[in-house]
Image: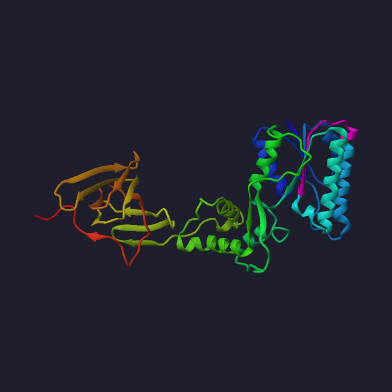
């Protein structure tokens, strides 16, 4: 399907165009200023997504020129070419307000509804909440984009704690809502449509999240993905990192035996560490009352031994990076791990709780008692 996207170079347009191409559609990209292409694109398109508009002009008149007059021109072009292509018009929740931007969007909505009713033409009017996601321009009209840029570039956040909460919607959810229309999952409607889900958040809450994301490189805590907004905000945050700042160092605890490094921590799912051992080195010889672990040798060859406390029977597991196997370390079993290969071994270790120096739950006891 050929899909005309007006405002294709903008934040929403770039993201939507990518989703459309991934779905196998051909995108006809149009932006304000390309008037000579409008008639050609309208006549050859199978669907029209109208995103082009003005929201930060130098003069008030530009609101009406970019949002009303161009919408009127698009409608006239549709009629002139006798196009039957359905239309999605991206309006704004500001259309219910009395600002010039809001009034210009409301006027454009009314134009499309009148056109749809008079000509029995399928039109879908979406009022968008504050859209956030990758590629949104900072210091323009998105607080999330501005703050993501600022905090990833060590710039201050200007927080008005008395500001009202704001309704946000994620760019991928906007694209998904539009694709449902394009795929025929929804029919034309005289009602206003809204992309879902949306999230009502305070600015202080968002600032706290972003500050936590930045600190996670120091404390190794990874964001929870249980909260959909939190998950989407973290994805957005990462997209604003400077390209020279994608990597960061970990604290490696090194000695003659190798190294031990905490990699990832969570508040509810424990932590992940990397253990590197030199050939012939044995680590461990301790047990836990409640803490439990999982070992995964990803490089080299190791022998893991376990013995139930109070028992003489020793259980052994030989694993290597050639065949990935996870070994569960239950509570009440003293255990150790030995590099039995000729090269350094690398073992991924997960523990069900964070290390607590005040209550380590780690008691020394050799797996093989000396006789």
Residue sitting nearer the eye, 355 or 323: 355
In the picture, measured across the screen, residue 371 lies left or right of residue 347, that is left
User: From the image, which quarter does the N terminus lie in?
Assistant: top right
**Quadrant of res 165:** bottom right
Which residue sits furthest front? Answer: 191
312 over 121 or under it: above or below: below
241 over 295 or under it: above or below: below
Residue sitting nearer the eye, 353 or 191: 191
Image colouring: rainbow
- In the rendered image, residue 340, in percent from the top left (x then y), is placed at 25, 47
Which residues are the magenta region? Answer: 78-91
Name the residue located 56 percent from the left edge and 50 percent from the top edge. 228
Magenta highlight on residue 89: yes
Magenta highlight on residue 110: no
Name the residue located 70 percent from the left edge and 35 percent from the top edge. 186
- In the rendered image, residue 54, in percent from the top left (x then y), is placed at 81, 53
Q: Is residue 138 visible?
A: yes
- In the rendered image, residue 351, in percent from the top left (x then y), is placed at 35, 53
**Quadrant of res 121:** top right
Residue sitting nearer the eye, 268 or 215: 268
């Amino acid at each position: 399907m050929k899909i005309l996207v007006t405002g294709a170079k903008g934040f929403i347009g770039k993201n939507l165009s990518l989703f459309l191409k991934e779905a196998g559609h051909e995108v006809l990209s149009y932006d304000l200023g390309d008037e000579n292409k409008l008639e050609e694109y309208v006549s050859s398109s199978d669907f029209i997504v109208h995103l082009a508009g003005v929201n930060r002009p130098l003069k008030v008149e530009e609101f009406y020129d970019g949002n009303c007059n161009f919408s009127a021109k698009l409608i006239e072009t549709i009629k002139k070419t006798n196009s039957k292509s359905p239309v999605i018009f991206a309006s704004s929740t500001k259309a219910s307000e009395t600002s010039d931007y809001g009034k210009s969007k409301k006027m454009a909505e009314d134009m499309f509804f009148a056109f749809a009713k008079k000509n029995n033409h399928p039109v879908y009017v979406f009022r968008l909440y504050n859209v956030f996601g990758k590629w949104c321009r900072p210091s323009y009209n998105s607080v999330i984009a501005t703050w993501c840029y600022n905090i990833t570039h060590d710039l201050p956040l200007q927080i008005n704690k008395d500001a009202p909460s704001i309704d946000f919607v994620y760019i991928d959810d906007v694209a998904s809502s539009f694709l449902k229309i394009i795929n025929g999952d929804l029919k034309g409607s005289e009602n206003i449509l809204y992309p879902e889900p949306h999230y009502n958040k305070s600015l202080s809450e968002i600032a706290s999240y972003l500050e936590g994301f930045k600190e996670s490189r120091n404390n190794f805590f990874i964001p929870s993905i249980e909260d959909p907004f939190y998950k989407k905000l973290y994805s957005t945050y990462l997209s604003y990192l400077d390209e020279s700042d994608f990597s960061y160092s970990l604290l490696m605890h090194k000695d003659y035996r190798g190294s031990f490094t905490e990699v990832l921590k969570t508040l509810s799912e424990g932590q992940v560490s990397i253990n590197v051992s030199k050939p012939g080195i044995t680590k461990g010889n301790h047990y836990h009352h409640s803490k439990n672990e999982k070992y995964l040798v990803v490089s080299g060859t190791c022998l893991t031994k376990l013995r139930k406390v109070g028992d003489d029977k020793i259980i052994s597991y030989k694993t290597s990076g050639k065949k990935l196997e996870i070994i569960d370390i239950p509570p009440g079993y003293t255990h150790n791990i030995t590099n039995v290969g000729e090269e350094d071994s690398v073992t991924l270790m997960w523990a069900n709780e964070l290390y607590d120096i005040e209550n380590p739950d780690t008691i020394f006891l050799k797996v093989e008692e000396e006789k």
